[in-house]
Amino acid sequence: MDSALLEVWHAASGSPFLPTVGKGSQFLVGFSLIVLAFGLTGAFALNRSIVNLPVLGVPASLAFAIGVVYMFCAVGVYV
């Protein structure tokens, strides 16, 4: 192992990783994001236009993707 990488490794051991969303609330956050994604998708389906794509379509797809990841992590399936 490179000595510079080894120094980074030892320096990082002093500061533990603290996730933004704790393990106990991952299911709630994931479920909320999926519900939000379905709501945005429904609003986009009612009025599909090129203007609504960045306003509703992209946030809906991002909320769904991140919500699914949190839901999988909450039940113990890591992607």
Image (spheres, helix red, strand yellow):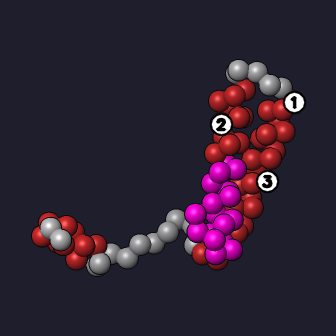
Q: Residue furthest left?
A: 3
Q: Residues within 10 Å of mark 2 (few under 14, many from 20)?
A: some
Q: Name the residue under label 1.
A: 46
Q: What amino acid type is highlighted by mark number 1?
A: Leu
Q: How crowded is mark 3: few (under 14 residues within 10 Å), some or many (20 or more)?
A: some
Query: Which residue: 71% across, 42% down?
Result: 60
Q: What amino acid type is highlighted by mark number 3?
A: Val
Distance in Å between CA atoms under marks 3 and 2: 15 Å
Distance in Å between CA atoms under marks 3 and 1: 17 Å
* Residue 29 is at least partly visible in this image: no
- Highlighted magenta segment, given as a residue range: 63-79
Query: Which residue: 50% across, 69% down?
Result: 19
Query: Is residue 60 one of those drawn in magenta?
Result: no
Apparent side of residue 30 relative to residue 6 in the rendered image (left or right): right
- The first of marks 3 and 1 along the sequence is 3
Q: Name the residue under label 2.
A: 58
Q: What amino acid type is highlighted by mark number 2?
A: Val
For the residue labelled by badge 3, is the local secondary structure a helix, a strand or a loop?
A: helix
Quadrant of the rendered image containing residue 75 = bottom right
Q: Mark 3 points at which residue?
A: 35
Apparent side of residue 52 relative to residue 79 in the rendered image (left or right): right
* Residue 71 is at least partly visible in this image: yes
Q: Is residue 47 above or below residue 43?
A: above
For the residue labelled by badge 1, is the local secondary structure a helix, a strand or a loop?
A: helix
Quadrant of the rendered image containing residue 33 = bottom right
Distance in Å between CA atoms under marks 1 and 2: 15 Å
Marks 3 and 2 close (CB-CB < 8 Å)? no
Query: Is residue 76 one of those drawn in magenta?
Result: yes
Marks 1 and 2 close (CB-CB < 8 Å)? no
Q: How crowded is mark 1: few (under 14 residues within 10 Å), some or many (20 or more)?
A: few
